[in-house]
Image: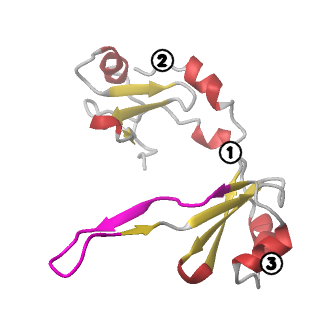
Amino acid sequence: MPNPDAPLCDCHWFERATRDNSIPVIFDELMNEYHLAHTGGGGYSLFCHCPFCGGRAPDSLRGSHWTEVSHEESYRLQELTNGIKTPQQLFEKFGEPDEDFEVSGSFTTPGSEDGPPETTLGPRRVVFKGLSDTADVHVRIVRYDRLRFSFMGRYIGPKRSEQASGGNGG
């Protein structure tokens, strides 16, 4: 988390770094954030402070691109999903999900002298978008068909294709 008492960076290191191809810093215009790009396309780390002067990085716009789920709405959704224990009950109550990610990852254990490697598929994840004006209901269907509910703010920012054509990407 950024230190709110630190002054904003005024040494312009971020701007210089994005123009220097030897420094893996990119600027995300949509979010108003500077990122340290990881090698091999493995994501990024968000800069909260300038590594040169210690000043704060610009304020992120990330929060303005999602709805805020109030405590009251979260409680209402908890009550709505209370008692749903199986995938069958889930789909009977809410119908088909808006999004269905049959497998959300996997991991493989190494083999041994006693047996070959084993691959375990990650949990199925489904998303219901019509149950709330401000939240998407995410449900992970984990081992033994147990359900894990979460209520996430809905993305309301620009369309992703607009972001791809509008950012400078470094």
Per the image, label 1 sits on a secondary structure element best described as loop
Count neighbours of disc 1 (C-alpha within 10 A) and say few if under 14, some if 14 to 19, many if 20 or more.
Answer: some
What kind of residue is marked 3?
A: Glu
Per the image, label 2 sits on a secondary structure element best described as loop
> What secondary structure is the stretch in magenta mostly built from?
loop
What kind of residue is marked 2?
A: Asn
Question: x and y percent of residue 138 in the render?
Answer: 67, 62
What kind of residue is marked 1?
A: Trp
* Pointer 3 residue: 79
Measured Cα–Cα span from mark 2 to mark 1: 22 Å
Count neighbours of disc 2 (C-alpha within 10 A) and say few if under 14, some if 14 to 19, many if 20 or more.
Answer: few
Quarter of the image containing the C terminus? Answer: top left
Task: Specify start and end residues of the magenta stretch as a single range.
Answer: 100-118
Above or below: residue 153 compared with residue 44: below
Q: Please tell me which of labels 2 and 1 falls first in the chain.
A: 1
Question: x and y percent of residue 3 in the render?
Answer: 41, 46
Count neighbours of disc 3 (C-alpha within 10 A) and say few if under 14, some if 14 to 19, many if 20 or more.
Answer: few
Residue 153 is left or right of residue 27, and the answer is right
Q: Is residue 151 magenta?
A: no
Question: x and y percent of residue 155 in the render?
Answer: 69, 43
Question: x and y percent of residue 168 in the render?
Answer: 48, 17
Q: State yes or no: discs 2 and 1 in contact (Cβ < 8 Å).
A: no
Q: Please tell me which of labels 2 and 3 falls first in the chain.
A: 3
Label count reads 3
Q: Is residue 104 magenta?
A: yes
* Pointer 1 residue: 66
Residue 44 is left or right of residue 74, and the answer is left
Q: Nearer the viewer, residue 14 or 67?
A: 67
Q: Nearer the viewer, residue 99 or 5?
A: 99
* Pointer 2 residue: 168
Give the quarter of the image for residue 146: bottom right
